[in-house]
Amino acid sequence: MATTSIQGIGVRYGIISAVAMIVYFLVIISLGLQDSEIIRFASNIFILIAVILAIGTLKKRHDAMNRETPYLPGLAIGFLVGLIGSGLYAAFILFHAIFINPGYAGVLENQDYFGVSLPLMMVLGSVVILGTAVGAMTGYILMMAFDNSGGSMATPTTGHRHLTNKPN
């Protein structure tokens, strides 16, 4: 499978996750919940869903060719979806905080994320890091589920011997 196909899957689902997170953000703004850290944190569920869908697409393509799903490209897709999705989402939040609602930048800066107040760019950087980690870890977990390198649990087909106390 070509590298561009892997990148294409990652970029496509990264953009889809970013759009979903932006729509989610606009919904929580309309409900007046944008100041809640927990509500904003829930946007990462869209990265998780997008990684699942992206790796499912990769698996379907390889199953159609009767090939095993490759491990490292699956990890790359998870990383790309997380990085692109969270990067675009952070860019949207930056755009929103600067041009649409300048007061929101102060809200983000004054929230106590890590025990201290952070500048806006550091808050957005943490959004990107967290989203990338969610994507990469989701990809890692899914690819472990698809990995068959540990051997098969199937019974051998060459003999009829069974482990019992009775001799044959």
Image (cartoon, helix red, strand yellow):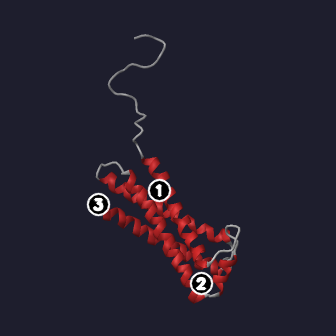
Which sits in the foreground, 39 or 166? 39
Percent x, y of residue 86: 51, 70
Q: Residue at x 33, y 53 (%)?
A: 62
User: Which of the labelled discs sits on residue 139, or is there none?
Assistant: 1
For this rendering, which residue is in front, 3 or 151? 3
Mark 1 vs 3: CB contact within 8 A: no
- Write down the quadrant of residue 60 in the picture: bottom left
- The image quadrant where one finds the C terminus is top left
Residue type at mark 1? Gly
State the image quarter where residue 118 is shown.
bottom right
Q: Residues within 10 Å of mark 1 (few under 14, many from 20)?
A: many
Using the image, tell me which numbered label, if any, was put on residue 2.
3
Q: Amino acid at mark 3?
A: Ala
Q: Is residue 125 left or right of residue 56?
A: right
Amino acid on which the number 2 mark rests in the picture:
Ala
Q: Position of residue 67 (x, y in %)?
A: 31, 49
- Image position of 94 (left or right of 107): left
Q: Element under label 3?
A: loop
Residue 149 percent across, percent down from the top left: 39, 41
The Cα–Cα distance between marks 1 and 3, rounded to whole angstroms, is: 19 Å
Residue 103 vertical position relative to residue 11 in the rendered view, above or below = below
Q: Could you say whether the residue bearing mark 1 is in a helix, strand or loop? A: helix
Residue 93, compared with residue 58, is above or below; it is below
Name the residue located 57 percent from the left edge and 84 percent from the top edge: 96
According to the picture, the residue beneath numbered tag 2 turns out to be 97
Q: Element under label 2?
A: helix
Which residue sits at x=68%, y=76%? Answer: 33
